[in-house]
Amino acid sequence: MTVPPQLGNAPFAAILAGVCGGIVVSYRCGAGVWLGVTLVVSGLVAGLLMERRRLYRRQWLLLLPLLTAFAGVGVMAAAVHAPVRADDLPGGCLARGVVRGVTPTDGGERLEVELQALTHPGSGTVLPLRSRAYVYVDSARFERGQTLSFPGYFSEPARDDSYRGYMFGKGVDLVAYLPDSLVVVTGSVPLWDDVPAAMQRSCVHALDGSRLSVQGRGFLKALLIGDRAELDPDVRQDFADAGIVHLLAVSGLHVGILVALVALLLLPLNLLGLRWLRFLLVAAGVWVYAALTGMNPPVVRAAVMVTCVMLSMLLERPGTVLNSLCVAGCVILLVDPRSLFDAGLLLSFMVTGAIMLFAEPLTPGRTNRRNRRRRGVLQMLVVPCVAFMVSWVLTARYFHSVPLIFLPLNLLMAPLLPLYFWLGAGYLLLRLCGLDAGWWAALLDGGYDCLREMAGWIASLPGATCSIWLPEVAAWLYLGGVLAFAFALVYKRRAWWGIAIAAAAASMIAICVLPTGCPPDRVEVTGNWKQTTVSVTTRGRTERASLPHDTLLTTRINGRQILLIDAPFAESSVASAPASADAIIIGPRYKGTLKQLQTHFKADTICLHPALPLDRRDELTTRSAFPF
């Protein structure tokens, strides 16, 4: 079957659309592999029939077989990576898995475990299991690559739909809270990303021994290699409220800055007739940077796209950057279909695609040598506006907060970010060679202080952010209107303008009429024997706080009075406690009964700590007595 000429510019756009549609259908409707096979065969048969009858003269028909076939591919990829529910797992089994990541917590560690199998201790039956889980333990003795065996007491990630969707996009289906004594290390295996992880640790150690200030070091780690462990939470919140939090998430923006630097440094190769070597070295440099970030998924996505662009230039094949972006999307989704629901992937791909589609048509003036500088200045204004036009709806949908005063700092960061990034990268290379320059570190610290002060000032302005909860239908209608707007700019037809206006109006009506999905006010408790994290949601806004263990205390979180009882009951210990609270949290060290508490305290909500054993939960009261 020949490829129609109408698909010559960006054929992977239609392929990516079909794969995305198949993934959505599979996860939303529970479609299996057989439906995917049926769609693939139907698409191929339809394509052959249309080729034989010469129906490609009608342009809208030529997309149908392509979309159908690759929708089937998307369905099959999603069925292979189907999620695992905790209710579907048999009880009383031992889980076996490999530690893929370790994150320190207040009371221990959070292990990202790639589950392999469940084993029934009595019969010895082994049930294969392909899923990822977060296992919270109360120690700090585990490492990447260790194989673990532990009781399979799993639960769902959260009752909050938005957070569950976030975890789904990350590929995490299950959560377990276990004491250290129940987790047994059975061995260790090599991981494919051991070398990138070691390279990232080398960068972290190099910066730890530098002359940078503590806060400047944490900022540079987040900016260069994506390590946000030492980043000040207040600074991160100020950057988010100012609308420039994307600077702290290593992504395609940082890869683009690196590509510009490497391409500029390798420009003399063109004069030597080694243009092909320049393209190969740029692609290799991007993958080395991806390894330094520990193969961070956004960087890997950008590296795939850059590689496609470099290969197309090397082979001198006609194509567009948009087509390379679609190629990268197809590769990523076929490897990990659930990344389609990851907020980071959607933001990076949609913002990049919007800049490719809108930046040039929306910049006034003709493209010639005389207007080049003026158009460059205008594009510095257009690009942040285009990025905000697409990103605000995704930010509101996933994070329920939209920065409003985003333009001033984005305009300032357009020239400053590449300079600061290049200075930071040069300083990191110097540190990896065992050298240090005090004046260089002072310059980086001064730049960080300037950025922090400006972000804090803009975040403190009234109306800097807006809290909003969008219905899902409204978000899809708005994005459909943006796509129709792109077609209207390209094809110059009134019909597309009408569709864009109608979709935008329908999205506004949906926002006003449909329920927003704002969660009700509630209190949630997570943690283990050494850690208690309380999440309090009030009017759609959630605040989290870590509380100490083995104590009785009262605190106020997000405007609600919280009483934690994680100690043996004693009359003297409750003398100073308030008689009423909005919520009482019963910790694992409380040995009394619920009736004893109710004689001293009044509360609207009673929460059980996750570390409470099942028999202790039944001993306290029946499950129906607790308002979950």
Image (tube, helix red, strand yellow):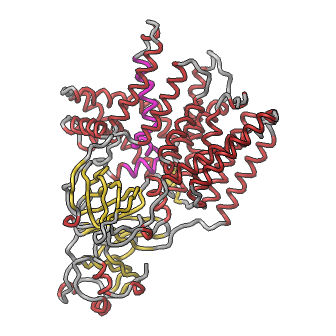
Which of the 4 quarters of the picture holds residue 84?
Answer: bottom left
Is residue 268 found inside the magenta-colored segment of the image? no
Where's residue 479, x and y in %? 64, 49
Main SS of residues in magenta:
helix
Number of numbered discs visible in the structure rendering: 0
Where's residue 446, x and y in %? 30, 35
Where's residue 68, x and y in %? 67, 46
Where's residue 383, x and y in %? 57, 35
Would residue 486 be found to the left or right of residue 167 on screen?
A: right
* Viewer-closest of 166 and 33: 33
Q: Is 92 drawn above or below residue 14 in the view shown?
A: below
Would residue 131 be found to the left or right of residue 3 on screen?
A: left
Magenta residues, start to end: 236-265
Which residue lies at the image location 50% right of the left edge and 64% below the top edge? 161
Which residue lies at the image location 47% right of the left edge and 40% below the top edge? 409
Which quadrant: the N terminus?
A: top right
Which of the 4 quarters of the picture holds residue 571?
Answer: bottom left
Would residue 267 be found to the left or right of residue 566 on screen?
A: right
Which residue lies at the image location 41% right of the left edge and 64% below the top edge? 157
Is residue 255 found inside the magenta-colored segment of the image? yes
* Viewer-closest of 154 and 531: 154
Task: Say if residue 516 shows up in the picture.
Answer: yes
* Viewer-closest of 323 and 399: 323
Which residue lies at the image location 38% right of the left edge and 80% below the top edge? 582
